[in-house]
Image: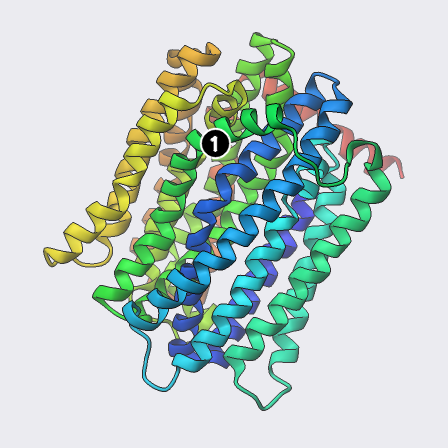
Amino acid sequence: MLYARMLLVMLVTLYTSRVVLRVLGVEDYGIYSIVGVVVVSFSILSNAMSGAISRFITFSLGQGDIEKVRKLFGVAVTIQFCIGTLIIVCAEIVGLYLLNTQMNIPQGRMEAANILFQFSLAIFIIKLFSVPFNALIISNERMSVYAYFGIGEVLLQLAVVFVLQLFPVDKLIMYGFLLSVVVLIYVTMQYTYCKRAFLSQMAKPTFDKKLFKEMAGFASWNFIGTSAGILKNQGVDIIVNIFTGVAINAARGIALQVNSAVTNFSENFITALRPQIIKTYAANDGAHLNFLVEQGARFSGYLLLFLTIPLILEMDTLLQLWLKVVPLHTATFARLQLIDAVVVSLSQTLVIVLLATGKIRNYQLVVGGINLLNMPLSWLLLYLGFPVLVTYIVSISLNVLCLVCRLLFANHLANVVIFHYVRKVVINVIVVACSSVVLPLIITYLLEPSLQRMVIVVITCILTTSLSILYIGMAASERTYIYSKVFGLISKFHGK
């Protein structure tokens, strides 16, 4: 169900991005991107606590302590209400100041940008209140339900695209309003389901000093990492806007859309794996924990390679087919964004196990500190006259360094074996990627860019990547398992 959700989300995201870009135009699409960036920047105040809520609920379920889960839920609702109030105040003061005085918004569109800001803030706050309910669904491993909700949300977003074209009003404002309605419906669905399925794990808003102290202590150190993650994209977007303008923000926004659509492959896999890793750590099963961490990172990387290799090779043709009107530099930004995503995928399970330990102070100081360098280094290089693509080079380089640091901390805190992880995951994925790309790369050099070449390259990539994963990436026991499943399906099919 998660992969059915992923496929639908990817297709709808690509389609809606194309239509929204056409309906809004490059200028308004750039405004939409930068306004969203300003609002999401305030998630610095909430993401750390959201991560704490998810971790503590999952950990308590792993220990079988339902009463603690109830208390955690009640405290979580109270905390989210307080954080939401604080964000509204800060956004209405600081956010509007940034939007109206520091952002590079075209003349005549400032009023629309301000109205869009209010809708974007409403969307953000509504999603903030859904965090405890989302945590319950994922922690209880109701992945099919999570997938159904995701499918419902993306179908509503698809409906928004069609409705947007029906009314002769300001499209930018209408788009913000319709998206806020979608999010409200989605969160209402989540609340209704949780009330029916997990009533024994839910509680009214309450305050428990001991639990609040535990969660706040975890969140205070997690704040560094979540802040760095936000500043990496949203913070750099603001800097890029100051140095360039909304046209470049439109290109970065589309590149991010491509990245989001692709990384859904690995993120769905990690979403299903996250509660298992945390619960395994809570049960103190070290051998199985190492197995989950390594397998999760390896197959997450494989899933990304299936899409990133053909996309990187044929990005120009695909963007032309998809968007028709392609903002300048979009293809280059998208390629670099995808390379960055593959690097990040090698660390995802390490992040989960490190957060599961709860001992994150030193980890966040080091890794979060490295990621926080993204914004000032990008500003410095842009100030010195480097092109905008340098911001992606900075991000990729820092993520490689973070992978090394996460490995060291995972070894110290959770006994993850560094040599084994490097050999089984990092080197393995690199070798599979290199062997997969050789033949498709030769084809791109031999043939002129065209739809026919794109089809040939995509098919070749699927074949070479599949064979590389099967015969280079997988162990003999894994191949045997795959063969048994395939032959079983064939036998079942012929039996009918």
Q: Quadrant of the N terminus?
A: top right
Residue 420 makes an appearance in the image? no
Residue at 50%, 25% in the rendered image: 355
Left or right: residue 229 versus residue 291 is: left
Residue at the bottom extreme, as displayed: 168
Q: Amino acid at mark 1?
A: Gln
What is the number of callouts on the image?
1
Q: Position of residue 74 (x, y in %)?
A: 70, 36
Instruction: Give the class, few, some or many, for how many residues have Cα within 10 Å of label 1's Cα (few <14, many ≥20).
Output: many
Given residues 470 and 148, the one toward you in this image is 148
Of residues 28 and 41, the one nearer the viewer is: 41
Residue for point 65% across, 20% down: 279
Seen at 29% across and 54% down, the residue is 445
Seen from the viewer's position, the closer of residues 338 and 141 is 141
Rendered image quadrant of residue 167: bottom right
Q: Residue furthest right?
A: 496
Q: Is residue 365 above or below residue 154?
A: above
Q: Horizontal placement of 157 versus 300: left or right?
A: right
Tell me where residue 31 sits by quadrant: bottom left
x and y, in percent, of residue 12 in the image: 61, 62
Image check: 81 left or right of 398? right
Where in the figure is residue 411, as x and y percent of width and height? 41, 13
Q: Position of residue 80 (x, y in %)?
A: 60, 45
Residue 310 in view: yes
Image colouring: rainbow
Identify the residue shown where x is 68% and y is 71%: 159
* Quadrant location of the C terminus in the rendered image: top right
For label 1, the SS is helix
Which residue position is annotated with label 1? 348
